[in-house]
Image (tube, helix red, strand yellow):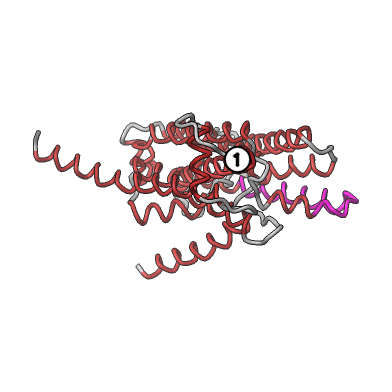
Amino acid sequence: MTGTTVARSARVGSRSVPVAVLALVLVATMVVALAIGSVHLPLSTVLDVVVRRLGLADLPVEPVDDRIVWQLRMPRVLGAAAVGAGLAIVGVVLQSITRNDLADPYLLGISGGATVGAVSVLVLGFGGGLAATTALTGGAFAGALASLAVVLVVAAGRTGALTPSRTVLAGVAVGQVCAAYTSFVVIFSGEHDAARRVLSWTLGSVAGVRWGSAVFLVVVAIVAVIALWCVSSTLDAFAFGEVAASSLGVGVAAFRWIVLTGTALVVAALVSFSGAIGFVGLVVPHVARILLGPRHTILLPASALGGAILLVWADTVARSLVPGQELPVGVVTAAVGAPLFAYLLWRGART
């Protein structure tokens, strides 16, 4: 083995250490989150329930503890981790491919379209129970896909070229139209409770996540991380601009179409269950780049883990901070993300 090979292996190993540390922090965070809530449980009880449910040991567990930990909190914690991871990696990719530091997962008007679908369902009115939840999720997903289609058509124009600047402007325009529709429907719906319900949805929550939706969200997040990690070298090429990427053999136009469409579908799937949760996909990629550098082989998994940790903690705070009441998780992420983003801007201005 040559000295160069040894040095390269050492660098790869040193870069993987933060990812391993973040993975351990995420596991510890999830265990603690399972213990915190309106009913606080000892960590030993949480571990007993998890070990028993995983079939590792037949430990004695109280039925009420099993229900709280495994049926109520575990799906919610898994859903929060999956949504946080998905939003963070999409933010990484969009900031890289558009070379826009302000790009976030809702760049393509996805949030506005999902809100239009959700608001239409909420205001039209559905009964409680599973039918209402399914209709809300389906409406949000359909709205997100419709807005994505409009943005891509407008941005591509007659040339078919999907440039970053036109894509961003098309996303902003569609988002504004969606916001206007939402305001119109809420004001003229005649329902006094409509504004509260719409605001609650748009600020985001994973309170409604159960095992079926949790498994779906986890699968979406894992597939997205793996798929984007496989093209990490191509994403690295975009750091030097489109000309440099083309000179390295990257089909810029085709790659941009595939990545923008794929990431938008990921966000649409996540948002349809969680609502629009801000700042996770904007702030986490910046922090990860500062700490670990721009290489996407490390940046993508680290951002995914960081986003998962952030949203699990945000959801835990949202459901525990005010006794007897649950805050929208978007309020917590904004309270953490906005000051942190302001600090990053201030820090960048000094360098």
Rendered residue at 76%/33% (across/down)? 130
Q: Which residue is mark 1?
A: 62
- Mark 1 residue type: Glu
Res 242 quadrant in image: top left
Q: Residue furthest front?
A: 60
| Secondary structure category for the residue under label 1 | loop
Residue 347 placed where, x, y %?
Answer: 40, 67
- Image x and y of residue 261, in percent: 54, 34
Q: Residue at x 63, y 45 (%)?
A: 206
**Picture mark count:** 1
Q: Quadrant of the N terminus?
A: top left
Who is closer to the viewer here, 334 or 31? 31
- x and y percentages locating residue 298 in the rendered image: 34, 43
User: Of 192 and 132, which appears nearest the observer?
Assistant: 132
Q: Is residue 136 above or below residue 185?
A: above
Q: Is residue 253 magenta?
A: no
- Please report the bounds of the magenta region as a residue range: 170-195
